Amino acid sequence: MVNKTKSASTNILFVCTGNTCRSPMAQIIFDNLCKRKGRRDIKITSAGLFTIDGMPQTITAVEALIHCGEKLGRKTIKSTLFKPEMIRKQDYIITMSGEHAKRIGDFEHVKSLNEFTGCGEILDPFGQKIDVYIECCKKLQVALSSLYDILFALEVG
């Protein structure tokens, strides 16, 4: 858990496979949550373990976010390949599955969303119908709300 003063920045990286569905959805949802809580000191990014830089977020993921009431803002999320040097730059690396966390390595600040919240694995909706993306988005909304409370429970403020 982070116990920093409000002037310190907290860096959180969400990771999935392709960085076009789950981790960008998590990035947007968590960013919106932080803004609603008045937090501008949390930098949220996302990356994929098996992707190439610059791929657009899937249209179905965007549609699911809109359906679930998330604000997209003007920022367009493009895929970013996870690189080992990202590990030391983050306070937390949150993966969508335990397998993703294992691939990154055994670091104290690298855990799956399930490890933090007990929400279960966030299954990949890629290529599926909109209802699967919407369920994924709803699951992320609940899990990320819990994650926020867990990460910042000890915060002085």
Image (tube, helix red, strand yellow):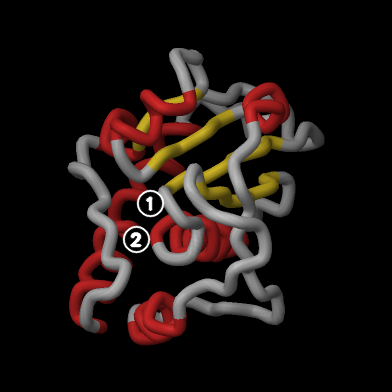
Q: Residue at x 75, y 37 (%)?
A: 9
Q: Residue at x 37, y 24 (%)?
A: 102
Q: Is residue 32 left or right of residue 96?
A: right
Q: Amino acid at mark 1?
A: Ser
As helix, strand or loop, the secondary structure at mark 1 comes to: helix
Q: Residue at x 20, y 73 (%)?
A: 132
Q: Is residue 5 left or right of residue 65?
A: right
Q: Amino acid at mark 2?
A: Gln
Tag count: 2
Q: Position of residue 109 (x, y in %)?
A: 51, 21
Q: Taking the image as drawn, is residue 37 in sight?
A: no
Q: Position of residue 47 (x, y in %)?
A: 57, 49
> Would you identify the image quadrant in which residue 125 lies?
bottom left
Label 1 neighbourhood size at 10 Å, few (<14), some (14-19), many (20+)? Answer: some
Q: Position of residue 66 (x, y in %)?
A: 43, 84
* Residue of label 1: 145
Q: Taking the image as drawn, is residue 24 in sight?
A: yes
Determine whether label 2 and label 1 are within 8 Å by CB: yes
Q: CA distance from mark 2 to mark 1?
A: 6 Å
* Residue of label 2: 141
Hey, which residue is sitting farthest right in the picture? 7
